[in-house]
Amino acid sequence: MDGDNDERELQTLTDHELMAAHVAGRDLAFTEIVNRHRDRLWAVALRTTNDPEEAADGLQEALLSAYKNAGSFRGDSQVTTWLHRVVVNACLDRLRRRAARPSVPLPEQDTDFGSLVLADQRDALGTRELRIELERALAELPIDQRAAIVLVDVEGYSVEEAATMLQCPSGTVKSRCARGRAKLATRLAHVRNPSADPSVGSPANDGGEGRL
């Protein structure tokens, strides 16, 4: 029963308290952090890599690194922000190391793309088709642009937070997001305007500027 009591106590702690407990050597403290945020970390890894196997390996590497290097967490940001930085960078490192090859399609899943979801959804079927198109379009972006879009437009982090995670200037994140959004807007022009023929090009009023 002591183990059950300890587990229940851990569940009452904040993320920062759990990190401190883990660094101090308390059993299961890091496990509790992972249990709280595993789904979101997996989603970020999957969207960043567009490859379930790479995502699984990247997430495993990231969590192992976070476990070993938790003492480097200074506590000046959210624990989730720190974990996302570790996960994204582990995934990007894997993508940059591997030879260029066709991406493995993402499994069909009910994914909420936040601000990337277009406002003119009409029905459930259209929404599902849109999500599939968004997944495919996102996968076609260069990995640096994809990572910026995932963090800012999908996960909702600020440009400054994303810059910290990606270890680059805020201006670089803004530029990557702008270029990525422009490509997504062009790629998805036929979805936003079903009457448009994607083989002809983007409609005149779909210049690809700004957020989708």
Image (cartoon, rainbow, N blue to C red):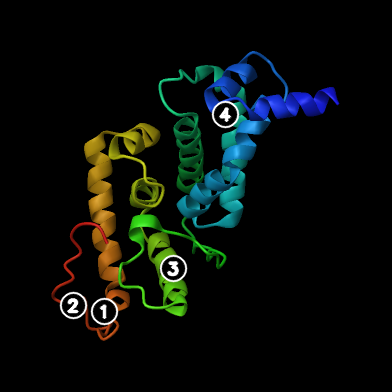
Residue flagged by tag 2: what amino acid is it?
Pro
| Badge 1 vs badge 2, beta-carbon distance below 8 Å | yes
Residue 104 placement, left or right of 190: right
Residue 98 placement, left or right of 38: left
Of marks 4 and 2, which one's residue comes earlier in the chain? 4
The residue located at (35%, 47%) in the rendering is: 144
Residue flagged by tag 4: what amino acid is it?
Ala
The residue located at (27%, 50%) in the rendering is: 177
Q: Is residue 76 above or below residue 83?
A: above
State which mark lies toward you, 1 or 4. Answer: 1
| Badge 2 vs badge 3, beta-carbon distance below 8 Å | no
Q: Position of residue 92 (x, y in %)?
A: 46, 44
| Badge 1 vs badge 4, beta-carbon distance below 8 Å | no
> Where does label 2 land, which residue?
203
The residue located at (32%, 66%) in the rendering is: 118
Q: Secondary structure at mark 2?
A: loop
> Where does label 3 land, which residue?
131
> Where does label 4 land, which residue?
66
